[in-house]
Amino acid sequence: DAKTTQPNSMESNEEEPVHLPCNHSTISGTDYIHWYRQLPSQGPEYVIHGLTSNVNNRMASLAIAEDRKSSTLILHRATLRDAAVYYCILRNAGGTSYGKLTFGQGTILTVHP
Amino acid sequence: DTEVTQTPKHLVMGMTNKKSLKCEQHMGHRAMYWYKQKAKKPPELMFVYSYEKLSINESVPSRFSPECPNSSLLNLHLHALQPEDSALYLCASSQPRGSEAFFGQGTRLTVV
């Protein structure tokens, strides 16, 4: 399975943008890039996903490098409720690992008031 | 309804007990998952069911036995567990190909 590398932790101030990086140099053509976050004492929550093009939704934006070997999750204005562990995950849409959603170590985001 | 419901929320069981965890979704998703999460660690995939058939078993010990009676329900039967099996057990569902997954809040299991 293709792996992802994320910084262990990042900090931000409230109402400032946050850019969470993810490296996935062994990504295959059928791997979607997914982001999930997990707030304390809760199950993971879907944030955004994409394949090749940049994506926006109400929660965040996903910027995907042209060679797809890295991506960045962008929270446009961090709030205290965004403090969580953020996971960047490659999800294969075909082949033998079809259907797997495998979590890496994630990035702990701390948001300061 | 975008919820995945897991019951019970908390469970304490002895090493000789048999218990079951239950997961339910009504989103029409045809893939369902069991994960195990230890404190301060990421969730670890245990099983994947696709169209009610077991498609992935991540070399999970046989004391954990999954069951998918229909497309909305997923069970995890537990027998002869060890204290190190104490963890948060998470259920998730999605459509099988590439789309977002929805997670339940988990069952906090303690084996004594």
Image: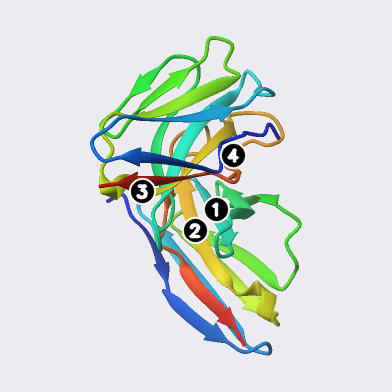
Where residue A103 sits in the image (x, y, percent)?
A: 58, 45
Camera-side mark, 4 or 3: 3
Tag 4 and tag 3, C-beta contact below 8 Å: no
Residue type highlighted by circle 3:
Ala
Q: Residues within 10 Å of mark 1 (few under 14, many from 20)?
A: many
How much space separates mark 3 and mark 2, taking CA atoms? 23 Å
| Image height of A60 relative to B58, above or below | above
Residue type highlighted by circle 4:
Gly
**Corner quadrant of residue A23:** top right
Element type at marker 1? strand
Q: Chain of mark 1?
A: B
The residue to which callout 1 is attached is B33
Q: Is residue A73 left or right of residue A92?
A: left
Residue type highlighted by circle 2:
Cys
Q: Which mark is residue A99?
A: 4
Camera-side mark, 1 or 3: 3
The residue to which callout 3 is attached is A83
Nearest the viewer among B39 and A28 is B39
Tag 1 and tag 2, C-beta contact below 8 Å: yes
Residue at the location (56% across, 80% down)? B110
Element type at marker 2? strand
How much space separates mark 4 and mark 3, taking CA atoms? 28 Å
| Image height of A70 relative to B1, above or below | above
Residue type highlighted by circle 1:
Tyr
Q: Chain of mark 2?
A: B
How much space separates mark 1 and mark 3, taking CA atoms? 26 Å
Q: Is residue B47 left or right of residue B1?
A: right
Nearest the viewer among A23 and A17 is A17
